[in-house]
Image (cartoon, rainbow, N blue to C red):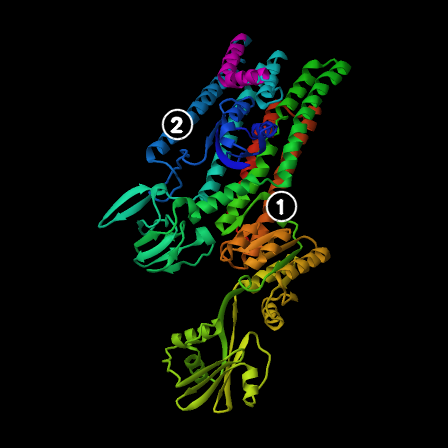
Amino acid sequence: MASSVYVIENLDCAGCAAKIEAQLNAHPKVEKAVITFATRQLHLTAEDPDALLSELQQIARTVESGVEFHPRDGRPTEHREGCESGRCALDHDHHHGHEHHHTHEHQENDAVAPILVGGCLFVLGLLTEHVFSGWLSLILCLGVYVLLGREVVMEAYENLRKGHVLDENFLMAIASIGAFFIGNAPEGVGVMLFYRVGEWFEHKAVERSRNQIMEAVDLRPQVVQLVEGDNVREIPASEAKVGDVVLVRPGDRIPLDGVVLSGESRIDTSAITGEPVPVRAAPGDLVTSGCMNLAGQLKIRAEKPLGESMVTRILNSVENAAASKPKVDRFITRFARVYTPVVVGAAALVAIVPSLVTGNWSYWVYTALSFLVMSCPCALVLSVPLAFFAGIGAGSKKGILFKGGQSMEVMGKIKAVVMDKTGTLTRGDFRIQSIDGGREILELCACCEQDSTHPIAESIVSEAMSQGIALRRPQELEELAGRGIRAMLDGKEILCGNGRLLQEKNVPYPKHESYGTRVLVAVDGVYRGSLTIADTVKPGSEQAVRQLRDKGIHTVMLTGDAKESAQAVAGMVGISEVHAGLLPHQKLERLQEVRRSSGPVMFVGDGINDAPVLAGADVGAAMGSGADAAIEAADVVFMTSDAEAIPQALDIAGKTQRIAWQNVIFALGVKLAVMILGLLGYANMWLAVFADSGVAMLCVLNSIRMLYHKGK
């Protein structure tokens, strides 16, 4: 089976998107079809997706006419306002982008003009009703209805011919035409006017929300400045090749992953990693696409093409995550299929049963028509996926890449967070933590260790060099496996190693517990001091663990490192439960024990050996600096590689779910309240339109709040 992604055009209804998805999945040659309304994309899995595209497009058009599917790659995408050279996300030339943009504006003007004209004529009709005879008002109402409702009625007729009875256009047409038949012509026109206005505002809110989210995550460049000798030429970013040299001016985003050839600057990496502090970039440094060049001009050699650079990987990750629908989304989609028929059935009962009892057909038919207006489930079907999409976008702004709504949903239920030590809570690099004996001890150790490639030896030499210590060559040097080094320096015997070495040489030394590796130094058989070298705890690790504890989440450390080292780090950051000296399969066993005792568990790691545990956890999180295998197996990736991203991710996931359920409860609550008010005689069709289009717009605006999530 092959999978392809297609862009969808002319799909403006979330409810229709759900219907199209269901029909595509019913096709015998389709393994899986997922429509993401928030990104207007179709993720299609089949033996030959491209060969099915035309047929599937025809199926989609039976639900909503004009729907088109286009391959994502190489297709013109919408030009965004305010884009500058090299700073906005396009894969096509300016001509196509502006042409699409102007066409879009033209279509919007075509939609607004009838609403404005119809609104003015409707007000005029209401005024003439009290000045002239009723027939003039009726003529104006009919004219306005034709102007505003023609497209709705024609679309309803086309859908009726295709067998789609309970679509939004049909229900709105029946409700508004029914108002004419019961003698409420102004009401029928007013409902259609309010519906069109609400639909327009809803469309604008969805578009603005979608654009805001995509602008937050789509940092792909349109063009790059290609350096050719002494000349600079602007070319489409998609045409840049590995090895090309590009010029990045102050204020420009770095267009491609590469290495700095010349120039120095400060780079703002917050768009990629969420790290607020700019970093220095100089010749030889690797730089990541999407980061902002703040100061000097840089020349960068491209190491990856646009399609493989970080900006594209992040965009693909976000789009794929949006296509992974959470359970609440799938539930709402199934619920919507039942909701509309139930409400329509209730409308029929309200129109007939009370009328037969009371004889007041006009009142109860009017009430039933308001039920029809509210029977469209768009507010429900639209708001939930948009809330999760906004949450995914909010995470990407902080360097947190969620791989799907499902993982975000599970994160809201996490009761325990299990962490690896090295690379997660610590930096994974050895540094001198303390020196007992002063500068002389560091100098002696560095002279003895300067030719060793051991990480501990390299850390000693690096520290000595940073302090400006001149290293001398020993006259003799003997490496003693598993113990250390014996050397002759300036005619003195130097022992530099562990306790076993000094014990063999009968050199007494003070013993004490310490975090890390202790390097002992003796000169001519006399103990002189020691160095303590250890992996450095990341600055935010303690705060991250404290925030998790404040949330009532149990924290655990699983590591393959020695027990003493693991317990020392756990004590520094505040983790109470530690399991050390574990092999990869033992980590998985301990994780299962934590799950049984605490509940759903999230594991955070970064090594190749963490991949099985990441896959076995309820939610697996990988540090972005970790191994590719760990990142691939994870459900969420922390580009910052800082432990503080753990509580941030849980905050975003939790708030996203709260907003999604707020939308569901609000939409259903308002619709139910208006239905009850209608039955009691306190609601009209205008309020029913608000319960449909107005509520949908408010839910969209509520969803977009996630983009402005500040966290704790």
Q: Which residues are magenta?
A: 135-161
Q: Earlier in the sequence, mark 1 or mark 2?
A: 2
Residue visible at 57% across and 60% down in the picture: 544
Nearest to the eye among marks 1 and 2: give it: 1
Magenta span includes 149: yes
> Which quarter of the figure has residue 280?
bottom left
Tell me: residue 79, above or below residue 481: above
| SS for callout 2 | helix
- Residue 171 percent across, percent down from the top left: 61, 20
Instruction: Tell whether label 2 touches label 1 (CB within 8 Å).
Output: no
Which one is in front, 550 or 252?
252
Tell me the quadrant of the picture where the N terminus can be found.
top right
Left or right relative to 359: residue 698: left
Residue designated by label 2? 103
Magenta span includes 698: no
Q: Amino acid at mark 2?
A: Thr
Q: Residue farthest to the left?
A: 230
Q: Amino acid at mark 1?
A: Glu
* Residue 84 visible in rendering: no
Which one is in front, 38 or 190?
38
Question: What numbered label is drawn on residue 409?
Answer: 1
Tell me the quadrant of the picture where the C terminus can be found.
bottom right
Q: CA distance from mark 1 to mark 2?
A: 39 Å
- Residue 159 percent across, percent down from the top left: 57, 18
Which one is in front, 308 or 282?
308
Specify few, some or many for label 1: CA neighbours under 10 Å numbering under 14, 14-19, or 20 or more. many
Magenta stretch, main secondary structure class: helix
